[in-house]
Image (spheres, rainbow, N blue to C red):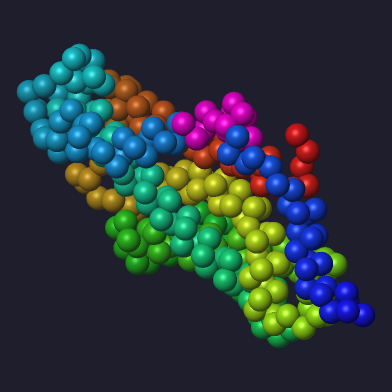
Amino acid sequence: MADAALTPSAPERQIPALLPRRPMLRHLVSDRTALAGLLLLILMFTAAAAAPLVAPRDPHEQDVANRYAPVSIEHPLGTDNLGRDELSRLIYGARVSLFTSLGVGVAILAIGMVVGSIAGFAGGILDGLLMRIVDVLLAFPSLLLALAITGMLGPGLLHLMIGMVAVWWTDYARMMRGLVLSMRERPFVESAQAVGLPGRLVAIRHVLPNIVGPVIVLGTLQTGRLLLALSALSFLGLGVQPPTAEWGAMLSEGQQYLASAPQLMVYPGIAITLAALGFNLLGDGLRDVLDPTMEN
C-alpha cells in the first residue's frame, strides 16, 4: 500500500512510452525535405525582416521613363508598369504576406486550442454548444465565409485578418477537442486522477504536453494554406491597398499586363508557391518527428 501511495510517478513513467525521446532537431535536419522547407522559410523570413538592408531600392520609388526594364544589375528582376524595382517590391511584399500569415496562424491556433480544450475538458452542455458553433462555421466554405466577413468590414489588411481569424480557428478546435477526449482515456491520465491530482495539473502536466505535437504540425501546414488564402483575398482587392507591396496584390496589379509583361505575375506567383511549399515540407518533417504513432 505504501508503494501505491507513490503512484503519482506512474503517469510520469508512461509518458515516455507515448512520446519517445528522440533527438528531434537531428531527426528534423536529417530529413532532406523538411530541411529544405526549413531553410527556404528561414531565407524568406530573414529577407523580409531585413528588407531595408537587402532590398536594392525603395519599393515605392517610381521611374516612369524606365517602365518594364529588363533584368539588369541595377534592377535584378526588372521593373513594373510604373518603373518600380520588382525585386524590392517582392522583398517588402514578403513582410506583409509572411508575417501576416504567421500572425493569423498564431491567433487561430490560440483560439482553437482554448475552445477545443474547454470543450474537451468540460463536456456536457458547454461542449455541445461550442461544437455546434464549430459545425455551423464548418458548414460554409472557409474562403467564402472569410470573403463575406471581410467584404462587410471593408477592404484593408486588419479587416482581412479579422475575417480569416473568425473562420479558420474551427479546425484547431475540433482537433484539439478530439485529442483531449482521447487523452483523457489513457491509463496514465486516469491514474493521475485516481491519486487525487487536481484537474488543472492533470491537464497541464499530462494531457497538453502529449497533444501539442499534432497541433504544431497542423499549425505549420495550415500557415501555408493561410498564405494562399491571404494572397487570394488580396488578389480580389480586399487586403492591402496600393501602393503597399504584397504578393497577392502584386498578382492583381500584374494581371492586366499579362500579355506584354508576364513577369509581373510570374515573380509573385513563384514567391507564393515557394513559401507555401516551405510550410508544407516543414510540416511533413515535423509530423514525422512529433507524431509518436508514426515510424521512420
Front residue of 107 and 69: 107
Q: Position of residue 126 (x, y in %)?
A: 67, 83
Q: Position of residue 45 (x, y in %)?
A: 37, 39
Q: Is residue 134 left or right of residue 251?
A: right
Q: Is residue 135 left or right of residue 61?
A: right
Q: Quadrant location of the N terminus?
A: bottom right
Instruction: Judge whether residue 98 is colored magenta.
Output: no
Q: Which residue, as the protein is rendered here, is positioned at the far bottom? A: 125
Q: Quadrant location of the C terminus?
A: top right
Q: Is residue 66 above or below residue 130?
A: above
Q: Position of residue 217 (x, y in %)?
A: 61, 48
Q: Is residue 115 above or below residue 176?
A: below
Quarter of the figure with residue 56:
top left
Q: Position of residue 235 (x, y in %)?
A: 37, 44
User: Residue at horizontal 70%, vertical 47%?
Assistant: 21
User: Residue at horizontal 80%, vertical 53%?
Assistant: 17
Front residue of 221 and 60: 221
Q: Is residue 214 left or right of residue 264?
A: right
Q: Would you say residue 294 is visible in this rendering?
A: yes
Quarter of the figure with residue 286:
top right
- Magenta-colored span: 27-39
User: Residue at horizontal 51%, vertical 43%?
Assistant: 224
User: Residue at horizontal 33%, vertical 52%?
Assistant: 239
Q: Is residue 195 above or below residue 86?
A: below
Q: Would you say residue 139 is visible in this rendering?
A: no
Front residue of 273 and 156: 273
Q: Which residue, as the protein is rendered here, is positioned at the far right? A: 1
